[in-house]
Amino acid sequence: MQASMSRPINPAIERPPEQFNFAAHLLALNASRAAKTAYIDDSRTMSYGELASRVRRFAAALPALGLRREERVLLLMQDCVDWPVAFLGCLHAGVVPVAVNTLLPATDYAWMIGHSGARAVFTSMNLLPTVQAALAASSPLPVFASDANEALLPACVQPFSALADHGDEAITAAATHRDDIAFWLYSSGSTGKPKGTVHTQGNLFMTTATYGRHVLKLVESDVTFSAAKLFFAYGLGNALSFPLSVGATVVLLGTRPTAEAVFDKLTRHQPTVFFGVPTLYALMLASPALPARSALRLRRCTSAGEALPKDVGERFTAHYGAPILDGIGSTEMLQIYLSNSDEYLRYGSSGKPVPGYEIRLINEDGLPAADDEIGELQVRGDSAALMYWTHRDKSRATFIGDWLKSGDKYVRDAEGWYTYSGRADDMLKVSGQYVSPFEIESGLMAHGAVLEAAVIGTVDADGLTRCKAFVVLKDGQVHSTALCSELRSFLKARLAPHKVPRDLVLIDELPKTPTGKIQRYKLRERDAAA
């Protein structure tokens, strides 16, 4: 049997020079596009010329706050034109932005402020009450609010424009090294405290040189729109690194990405490339407001965060004609490293290694997994994070030399296609055989009545593990015992008997992290308490 160790396609992968500042790099790339629109948010637009001016002015204003190279600031801001100004302005000055999820409680932000040692907070007006509650529980810091009505600002808060519109535009970028710390992203923290994932100036460049150039292939005429927010690793590439590296135009959505809000952006601004997640694609297809193919001009879509069910990908492409390039990435690797592409597309699979990355699967015995054998996915490539901040044990367990342990289980076939089997902690062993929850969930979602599903293991009276499914129905479907029986019969025709859930529970919604990932451990807790 051939071992599941992939070798990447080896086109020339460009690398940044040793002295490298990613913000200065992007501004230089777009120096000739001053009049072109860079960003369109919910209320205004910003040209590439204005972006460059505001980034430099912002960077120049940071020393007046007492901020020095490598000191951290909290970037807690909804997606708007000020977000890339703050992020790139910090990188330009060598200050480290800590980009965080806007949907968390004040207690989480208080912990992040203390953990990161943040020296200032950049936020949005509607998040001010949460920020103030967090600071009351941690320590007072300078706060700057985007889209601020100065007459309504508390005395301790200043408008973001005081920095972005009044600094010295003639500033020179900090002479950073490509391996200097540039920014942090916090992991989702679904089972404990989130981990501060530390990335370098060069890591952003490497994602554009690998996935951006060889898979995504944006061009200057593209208009892009990402439902995933800028504070996610996925969204950061989608709405900043990739489009700005080619001079494309970016559409931003400040509010929650409901199907209806996404439809509004797709029809109003006519993006050519859309970045979504599996749950959103399913919700879009189930919505009665789904626009006709003729109403949009999509040429390509991508999906990440969780594996895209085969049925969802096929139905979306049948409706719009645009492929969804499903892939897997992580906060630790910053972007997608295993993906479908123009050259190879197979719904139900995460595709093949992105040029510039190597993938290996390791079985239970710590050996390379054979073809068609489940193994834990490990990856190596030049966009890997340096570490988890102040978490040495977890860093050592995750970053193994050149390799990074993903925590995902995969199967690779003889043709080199990788198929997701589930998170390592979620895999089930039923009747002595490994069962992928994702396989069962995908089977359920192929039924016309099902919107979402999640599968866990439950122990029966004999001490044996059995599969249990929690199912969310589409709007208009009625919960009934007859439908549960129909769903089991539907699965029996598609899966081996030991994979068909003995118990099937219809619920109104699944528990999820703020990033939209299903929290199966909460379903296990619910099952144990029943």
Image: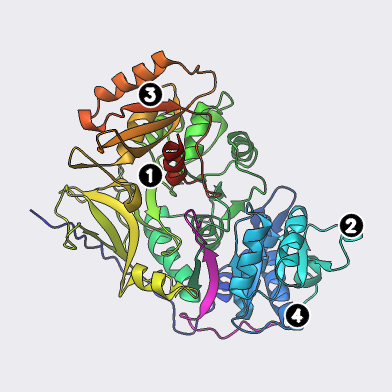
Q: Secondary structure at mark 4?
A: helix
Q: Residues within 10 Å of mark 4 (few under 14, many from 20)?
A: few
Residue 502 or residue 197, whichever sits in front = 502
Question: Residues in magenta?
Answer: 169-194
Q: Which mark is residue 65?
A: 4
Q: Is residue 453 toward the left or the right of residue 273 in the image?
A: left
| Residue identifier under label 2 | 152
Q: Earlier in the sequence, mark 1 or mark 3?
A: 1
Q: Residues within 10 Å of mark 3 (few under 14, many from 20)?
A: some
Q: Which mark is residue 179?
A: none
Residue 316 or residue 520, whichever sits in front = 520
Q: Residues within 10 Å of mark 2 (few under 14, many from 20)?
A: few
Where does residue 149 sit, x and y in percent of width and height?
86, 57
Q: Earlier in the sequence, mark 3 or mark 4?
A: 4
Where does residue 102 sit, x and y in percent of width and height?
64, 54
Give the CA separation, mark 4 to mark 2.
Answer: 22 Å
